[in-house]
Image (cartoon, rainbow, N blue to C red):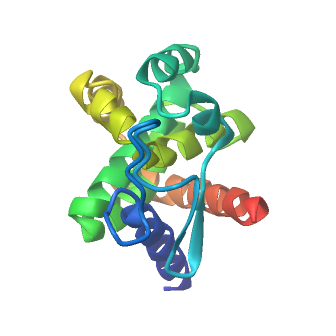
Amino acid sequence: MKKFLIIGCLFLALGACGKDDDKSTTSTENNAILTPTENVGERVISESKLMQNIDGDPQKFLIEFDNFSDAQKYYFCAAFAMGAMSVSKPITASVMVNYFMGLGVARYNEGINDQNYEAFNAGKNTFLYESLVNTVLEEKICEDIMNDAADFAKKHNYNVADLDKQGKKEVAKVLRYIQNEK
């Protein structure tokens, strides 16, 4: 139950990304939805180093994304998908967290490490920039990656419960990274 609450808090913070409130900015200069370190409730959303370098520029983003390994692309997309779901269907997002993380390990034989966490963090930070969200959606950047991973699991008969169990370990790693950022 405690882990569920922690995961829920994580996605409440992710879900706050992109929502307009009195504190958000809509700078046309960098298309930021929130400032890089915006207070949301009691949590602070910190922008990843990669997102700071990209500064909302879709072309820079596409170049950086192309340089990601396959596992990094997956974890970026997993975070992006979870962030998008947390805005529209928070309950679904919280249920899918472990599955998505376990699916990454199954498909790419890599869990969360420094490089994959940076990509994951960039995926959740994409919501700080409307132009990047639009690029990911319009170019269908994550659609094929997520479908490929799901097809892989289906083809190899992975059990959802096993993916969920593996994913819990990866979520714990993500939480450690987040705690170390503070």
67 to the left or right of 151:
right
Please state the horizontal and vertical placement of residue 171, each as a whole percent of the image: 57, 59
Please state the horizontal and vertical placement of residue 128, each as a whole percent of the image: 45, 48
Name the foreground residue: 124 vs 97: 124
- In the picture, which quadrant includes the C terminus? bottom right
Q: Is residue 169 above or below residue 151?
A: below
Query: Residue drawn 31% across and 64% down?
Result: 20
Q: Is residue 9 above or below residue 97?
A: below
Name the foreground residue: 95 vs 129: 129
Query: Residue drawn 34% across and 41% down?
Result: 130
Q: Is residue 179 above or below residue 128?
A: below
Location of residue 161 (image quadrant): bottom left
Q: How many numbered marks does the figure carry? A: 0
Name the foreground residue: 148 vs 51: 51
- Does the image show residue 2? yes
Query: Residue drawn 36% across and 31% down?
Result: 149
Please state the horizontal and vertical placement of residue 5, each as a whole percent of the image: 48, 81
Please state the horizontal and vertical placement of residue 59, each as a whole percent of the image: 45, 16
